[in-house]
Amino acid sequence: MPAEWELSDDLPDEDVLVIEITPPWKMYFDGVSHKEGTGAGVVFVTSEEEVLPYSFTLTQNCSNNVAEYQALIFGLEMAVNTKQRHFKVYGDSQLVINQLLGLYEVKKPELLPYHNYAKRLMGWLGDLELEHLPRRDNKQANALAKLASTLSMTDKESRIPICKSWVIPPVCSDDEDDMFQEEKNHVMEVFEVEEEDWRQPLVDYFKYRKLPNDPRERTDTRRRAARFIYYKGTLYRRSFEGIFLCCINDDEKDQN
């Protein structure tokens, strides 16, 4: 650099140089299978450190490895619907993690459909990191899985909300998968709400990462979003008891 040039600490348009980096969401999963039942647990930790726990009672008996894949797929399906595209996924099943990383071969035919479906979901998420961790560091997901598996076979009424489900991996060739992706790229989703609908800023944030123009509203939307989740076209708010409540507008409230 020529000696006559002077360095300046003044930067024009400093606001333009500010880049907001949102931390990735974390997802922990675990599956449990024993004589009392089978269950899956998934825990999301949002970029705002909000903890979102889920329990699933599996409706069929299966091996522990299948239960692990079930838990992973439940989590990945929910992750796809959150519209977030940066996840760190943790599980304590060395077999499942290493199979998905390509370090282990999938030898058992019953695991192959789950493996292929999980890989497809991971591809849809884009920026995803997969990591094995010791069971002692996966206590929350393990506890949820054990809880769901224990309650699956009891006749007593439980007041803890447990989702009952079972994953059936779709049978799809590589050509069909490419066709699906091509069609998906040409589809525009439309979510119609009224102008004064209080949900609109949150819906825009989850679907399109769009924030209001007003600085105060931008901050308020980011803060409130930690307690909400957008799943399959519906906005839900997480209560203090951990239950997700469907969000409605004033007109829908009056109709009910």
Image: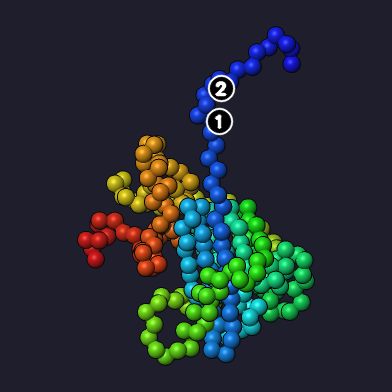
Residue furthest top as drawn: 4
Query: Circle 1 sits on which residue?
Result: 17
Q: Nearer the viewer, residue 172 or 224?
A: 224
Residue furthest left as drawn: 254
Q: In which quarter of the image is the C terminus?
A: bottom left
Question: Which type of secondary structure does the marked residue at label 1 adopt?
Answer: helix
Q: Please tell me which residue is depicted at 36% across the width and 64% down the height of the picture.
A: 240
Mark 2 crowdedness (10 Å alpha carbons): few <14, some 14-19, many ≥20: few
- x, y (%) of residue 250? 25, 56
Q: What residue type is labelled 2?
A: Leu
- Depicted 174 relative to depicted 146: above or below: above
Q: In which quarter of the image is the N terminus?
A: top right
- x, y (%) of residue 153? 48, 88
Q: Please tell me which residue is depicted at 40% across the width and 41% down the height of the picture.
A: 218
- x, y (%) of residue 81? 51, 59
- x, y (%) of residue 182? 62, 54
Q: Which of 222 and 229 is in front in this view?
A: 222
Question: Given this view, does label 1 or label 2 mark the residue nearer the observer?
Answer: 2
Q: Nearer the viewer, residue 234 or 57?
A: 57
Q: What residue type is labelled 1?
A: Leu
Disc tally is 2
Q: Please tell me which residue is depicted at 56% across the width and 52% down the height of the picture.
A: 24
Question: Which type of secondary structure does the marked residue at label 2 adopt?
Answer: loop
Query: Circle 2 sits on which residue?
Result: 11
